[in-house]
Image (cartoon, rainbow, N blue to C red):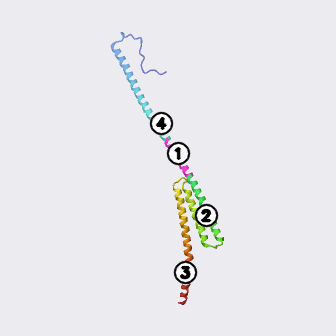
Amino acid sequence: MASSPIQAVPTDVEHEKLSREELLALLRDVTEQRDNLASQYEAMTLQVDESVREIAADELDARQSEKKAEASEHRAEQEAAHAAELSSQLVEERRKRAEIADEFARFREAAKHALVEDPWGVLWRAASQIVSDWVAWARAKIPPDSAFLPWFDRAVELVKALSRLAFKGAKALFEWARPHVIDLWERLKSKMRRQ
């Protein structure tokens, strides 16, 4: 067991036998030992306070590092989910693009082998099919509960009606102008031959 820094004071000291100088010397020794213990205690208290502050700062740093790590992990998960979503959208867009390319290839093949009795009818059907596909694609992009959807449908119907009228008008104009253009062409050819 370690010895105490305080010197053992005899308890059975007879106070009358000690002189005043001896008592003062003993009192000085005890006071000095008390002051030494008080300064050691203060130094230990300062060390403990400093250690507590360091531990608290380390704990705060650890918590902040943990929060940053969690935030980084959460951000990485969000970015991975976003990348996966974009990847699936890209795959879907590529699939749709391939479907459209196949549809055009089928149309080209059908157009090559189709007998053309009415070129205007073939042109109208081809244009109608292409425009219908575009309209269906655009309509699919509008949410079903959107207030814009009925207006979109009305606008499509209006454009269809106007297109039919324009097509009929253009066909009638062509049919009317064809004989005139042919007649004009014949006159020009005859004039060129005379010269």
Q: Secondary structure at mark 4?
A: helix
Q: Position of residue 139 (x, y in %)?
A: 55, 58
Q: Main secondary structure of the magenta part?
A: helix
Residue where numbered disc 4 is placed: 59
Q: Position of residue 105 (x, y in %)?
A: 63, 66
Q: Which mark is residue 88?
A: none
Amino acid carrying label 1: it is: His
Q: Residues within 10 Å of mark 3 (few under 14, many from 20)?
A: few
Q: Are marks 3 and 1 in contact (CB under 8 Å)?
A: no
Residue where numbered disc 3 is placed: 180
**Distance from label 3 to label 1 (Cα)?**
75 Å
Q: Nearer the viewer, mark 3 or mark 1?
A: 3
**Distance from label 3 to label 4 (Cα)?**
96 Å
Q: Is residue 68 magenta?
A: yes
Residue where numbered disc 2 is placed: 101
**Distance from label 4 to label 2 (Cα)?**
62 Å
Residue interval drawn in magenta: 67-84
Q: Position of residue 193 (x, y in %)?
A: 55, 88
Q: Position of residue 143 (x, y in %)?
A: 54, 54
Picture residue at 47% right of the left edge, 36% below the top: 59
- Closest to the observer: 161 or 34? 161
Q: Secondary structure at mark 1?
A: helix
Amino acid carrying label 4: it is: Glu
